[in-house]
Amino acid sequence: MTTITRFAPSPTGMLHIGGARTALFNYLFARRNHGQFLLRIEDTDKARSTQAAVDAILDGMDWLGLKPDQEPVFQSRQSDRHVACAMELIEKGAAFRCYVTSEELQHRRERGEAARASAKQEGLSESEKSARFKEAEELLAPFRSPYRDGGTPPSPDAPFTVRLRAPDQTDIVLQDQVQGTVKVAANEIDDLVLLRADGSPTYMLAVVVDDHDMGVTHVIRGDDHLRNTFRQIPIYQGMGWPVPSFSHVPMIHGDDGAKLSKRHGALSTTAYRDMGYLPEALNAYLLRLGWSHGDREIFTLDEAAEVFSLDAINKSPARLDLAKLNDVNAHFIRACDPERLLNLLRPWLVEAAGHDLSDDIYKKIALALPTMKDRGQTLPELAEAFRFLWTSNADNLNKKARKSLSGDKISTLAELREIIAIVPEWRDTALQHALESYCSSNELSFGQVGPPVRAALTGGLPAPDLAPVMEWLGRDETLTRIDFHLARAEMQGE
Ligand code: GLU
């Protein structure tokens, strides 16, 4: 049988990173088993579903490379089928028409709460107290409809809901692939509504019908849905359908151990793109957040698809750890193809510079990129590291750079300028050689010679070794930057 998994988000907001991880697990499990990964947009809640949220989900999945194997299914378009299944459940005796109105139910709940409150009053005898508690318990227990075994409608045209007849005696046992065996007693399950009084299907019905119709064999989702599963299994049983395999994955928590919320920082998947993370880094990070394979930390999607398994999903909630995400991102930046990395960097370079950069600067950045790519854990950090390539920072020297460009350091700079100017081949090895031979013939250490050149070239901005910096800047720009400081010193009478 072909393995079919699905991701079934409700389009009521962004693609949350918890949702992205669920999508990732479903995607990997399908690939591992040479099956199919499907997407279903659960848009039955018309008031809360928006096109913008659908777009955000598609955009986030596309960015992460989690491509479904078929066009998405929109749950709201299947409602005729949901209604037909509810009718079939009535015919099979697994569901029934219920004429209890929502007002009556509300009234029942209120009576239950009042009984519970009154049981706590002072001055009641023990037997009075327990009688009231018992009454409260009955009224607040999962609802079992008086119509579950037939009954006449209060009037011929009385509105009704369609309810599933909850299991009478048999407890529901789930062999969850992550949580193990989980059991819920039959009396904890209510006669759940399948069709509302206005004829619209409920989520509980829709999710089961759609999963069945889409041929889903494995449901992998957040453990916030574990309780729902016990209400969904009787629907499968009522229809005579096979029950899929379930895996309920523990939630992601913040670094303080509390459930993830806005105060833990960005929750939306694409917010990570907007902060300069690579999609492969977020995938690798989310994968390890709740799943493990030995102590290996870094996987590409292809590598993970070779080894992903449900039994290696952790049973306890995972904690979001941004420092670790940064490390993983740095790894993927280093591993990134230089041409792609440059393209990813472009908007960040423009943002750092505050203006467009010339082709000449991009050429210099491309030249420097292989050496420089370990200088940032995120794209904006890395873009910032290239600043010295588009500005000499001459008007913004820090104290150290100013000191390196004063007194007798200026004559060192002037002498070096002449030597550098005639280096035959403008490559870092030749430039390094020129600097070193200047040092040895003048009996100077590199620590005496390097700082004025560095200050002239980068104006105190962070940069790697001098020789490659000169190579990337090119002969003209290198000499122009040095000449600027020599002329300024002359004007100031240094
Ligand atoms: N639509 C549900 C949600 O977004 C998921 C349902 C499911 O995975 O079964 O939480």
Image: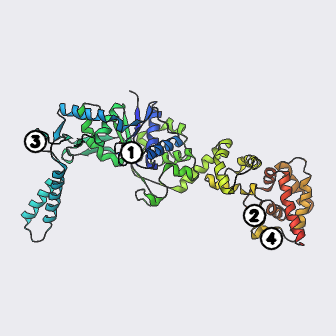
Mark 4 or mark 1, earlier in chain: 1
The image's mark for residue 155 is: 3
Tell me the mark number nearer the camera, choosing from 4 and 1.
1
Q: Residue 312 vs residue 133: left or right? A: right
The one of 110 and 31 positioned closer to us in this rendering: 110
Residue designated by label 1: 10
Q: Are marks 4 and 1 in contact (CB under 8 Å)?
A: no
Q: Are marks 4 and 3 in contact (CB under 8 Å)?
A: no
Mark 2 or mark 1, earlier in chain: 1
Crowding near the residue tagged with mark 3, few <14, some 14–19, many ≥20 C-alpha atoms within 10 Å: few
Label 4 sits on a secondary structure element that is helix
Mark 1 or mark 3, earlier in chain: 1
Residue designated by label 2: 460
The yes-or-no answer for disc 1 within 8 Å of ligand 1 is: yes
Crowding near the residue tagged with mark 4, few <14, some 14–19, many ≥20 C-alpha atoms within 10 Å: some
The yes-or-no answer for disc 2 within 8 Å of ligand 1 is: no
Label 1 sits on a secondary structure element that is loop
Mark 4 or mark 3, earlier in chain: 3
**Residue type of the residue flagged with mark 2:** Gly
